[in-house]
C-alpha cells in the first residue's frame, strides 16, 4: 500500500470521529466501523475513491431557506396533513396478493400496464442485486423468478419513490435522500441474508422506507423542519433528537404512521417506527437489522436523510445481529457496488446523484 499522507489521514480521522461522536467508540463493532470509515474517508479525500458520495447536509444559512413562518397545524392521525396515496398499481398488486388464485401472469399483466416500472423491474432483476445466473427478458419470467413477495416489495419501493417526487430542497436533495435510503435497504438485505432470516426483500423495503417520515416533515411541516435543523446545528445534536423537541415526535414515528395509513404490514411499520428505538419494537430482530444498517449507512455517508451524526448503537439490538466484525469489510465492498447500481435503476433520472 502506498504511503499515507499524514495530513489527509488526520482530517479523515477527525471527520469520522466527529460523525461517530454519539456512539460508544470502545465497542468492538463501532471500533471496526470507525476504522473502515476512516479509510473510506481517506480514499475520498485523497481522490482515490470515486465511489464515495459525500452528501452530508450543509449548515442552514438564513439566505438558503426562504420560508415564511406560519402556524402548521398537524396531528399524527393524519387528519390535518393530507397524506399522499400510493399509485394505483400498488393497490392492484396488493389485491392480487390477497387472491390465492392469482398466477404469475396476472401479476405480469398489471406490471406491463406501467412500462417504465416494467423496464426498471427487469433491469433490477438482471442486476447484481439479484445475482441471477441467466438473463430474464420478460416480465412474467421476472415474476416467476423473484416470486410475488419480492415483486410486492419492489413495486412498493418504486411506488413510494414515485409518490415523493418533489420536496423542498432546503434540507436535503432527493438524490441524496434516496441514496441513503437505498444504501440502508441494500445493507439490511445483505445482513438478513447473512443471518439467514427469510424474505430478505422486506428488509430492502424497510431500509428504503426507514426515514420516509423525514419526507413527510419536509413536505408538510417545512417550518418545523427548518426549526429542527437549526436546533440540531445550534446544539450540535442528532437531528432526530431535535425533531422530538420541535415536533414532539421524530421522523421514525411519522414514517410509521404513514405506513399505517398506507395499510402496510405491522412488521414493516415496526421496522420503520422503531429504527431508532429497537427496544420498543415488537419484532425486535427485524427492527435491529434496520437499526444497524442505518448506523453503517450513516457511518459510510452514502447520501443523507438530513442527519449528520451516526446514531448510537443499541447494545440489545446488536445481540440479534452479532455479525463477525471481519464481515464488515466485505459488506462495505458489496454495498459500494450495489447501491450505485440499484439507485441508477430505481430512481427517476432527475433524481440521479452525481456520484454515489
Ligand atoms: Fe432515522
Ligand atoms: Fe437513516
Image (cartoon, rainbow, N blue to C red):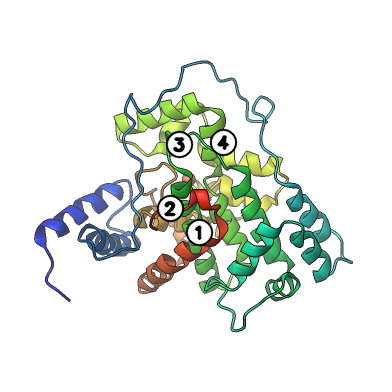
> Which callout, 1 or 4, points at the residue further toward the start of the chain?
4
Q: How far, Cα to Cα, is label 4 from label 2?
A: 21 Å
Q: Mark 2 points at which residue?
A: 353
Answer whether labels 1 and 2 touch (C-beta < 8 Å).
yes
Q: Nearer the viewer, residue 178 or 149?
A: 178
Identify the residue at horizontal 86%, vertical 66% (top origin). Answer: 102
Q: Mark 3 points at which residue?
A: 169
Q: Distance between the residues labelled 4 and 3?
A: 13 Å
Residue 281: in sight, yes or no?
no
Earlier-in-chain disc, 4 versus 3: 3
Q: Position of residue 57 (x, y in %)?
A: 36, 41
Residue 169, relative to residue 178: is it above or below? above
Q: Is residue 162 left or right of residue 93?
A: left
> Is ligand 2 closer than 8 angstroms to the Cβ of mark 3?
no
If the image is split into quadrants, where does the N terminus sit? bottom left
Cα gap from disc 1 to disc 2, whole angstroms = 9 Å
According to the picture, the residue beneath numbered tag 4 turns out to be 216
Mark 1–mark 4 Cα distance, whole angstroms, equals 21 Å
Q: Is mark 2 on a helix, strand or loop?
A: loop
Judge whether residue 328 can be spotted in this image.
yes
Amino acid at each position: 500500500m502506498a504511503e499515507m499522507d499524514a495530513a489527509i489521514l488526520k482530517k479523515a480521522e477527525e471527520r469520522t470521529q466527529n460523525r461517530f461522536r454519539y456512539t460508544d467508540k470502545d465497542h468492538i463493532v463501532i471500533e471496526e466501523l470507525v476504522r473502515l470509515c476512516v479509510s473510506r474517508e481517506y480514499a475520498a479525500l485523497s481522490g482515490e475513491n470515486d465511489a464515495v458520495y459525500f452528501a452530508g447536509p450543509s449548515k442552514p444559512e438564513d439566505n438558503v431557506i426562504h420560508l415564511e413562518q406560519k402556524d402548521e397545524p398537524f396531528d399524527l392521525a393524519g387528519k390535518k396533513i393530507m397524506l399522499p396515496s400510493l399509485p394505483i398499481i400498488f393497490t392492484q398488486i396488493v389485491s392480487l396478493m390477497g387472491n390465492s388464485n392469482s398466477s404469475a401472469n396476472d401479476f405480469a399483466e398489471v406490471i406491463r400496464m406501467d412500462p417504465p416500472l416494467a423496464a426498471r423491474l427487469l433491469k433490477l432483476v438482471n442486476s447484481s442485486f439479484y445475482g441471477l445466473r441467466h438473463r430474464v427478458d420478460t416480465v412474467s419470467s421476472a415474476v416467476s423468478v423473484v416470486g410475488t413477495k419480492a415483486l410486492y416489495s419492489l413495486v412498493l419501493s418504486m411506488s413510494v419513490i414515485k409518490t415523493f417526487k418533489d420536496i423542498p430542497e432546503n434540507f436535503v436533495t432527493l438524490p441524496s435522500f434516496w441514496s441513503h435510503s437505498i444504501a440502508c435497504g441494500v445493507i439490511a438485505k445483505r445482513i438478513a441474508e447473512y443471518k439467514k432470516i427469510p424474505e430478505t426483500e422486506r428488509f430492502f423495503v424497510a431500509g428504503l422506507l426507514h426515514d420516509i417520515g423525514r419526507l413527510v416533515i419536509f413536505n408538510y411541516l417545512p417550518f418545523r423542519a427548518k426549526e429542527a435543523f437549526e436546533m440540531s446545528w445550534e446544539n450540535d445534536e442528532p437531528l432526530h433528537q431535535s425533531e422530538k423537541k420541535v415536533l414532539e415526535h421524530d421522523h421514525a414515528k411519522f414514517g410509521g404512521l404513514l405506513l399505517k395509513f398506507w395499510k402496510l404490514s405491522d412488521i414493516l411499520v415496526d421496522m420503520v417506527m422503531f429504527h431508532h428505538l429497537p427496544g420498543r419494537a415488537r419484532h425486535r430482530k427485524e427492527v435491529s437489522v434496520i437499526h444497524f444498517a442505518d448506523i453503517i449507512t450513516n457511518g459510510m455517508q452514502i447520501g443523507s436523510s438530513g442527519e449528520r451524526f451516526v446514531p448510537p448503537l443499541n447494545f440489545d439490538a446488536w445481540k440479534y445481529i452479532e455479525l463477525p466484525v471481519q464481515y464488515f469489510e466485505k459488506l462495505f465492498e458489496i454495498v459500494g457496488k450495489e447501491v450505485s447500481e440499484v439507485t441508477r435503476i430505481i430512481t427517476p433520472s432527475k433524481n440521479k446523484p452525481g456520484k454515489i
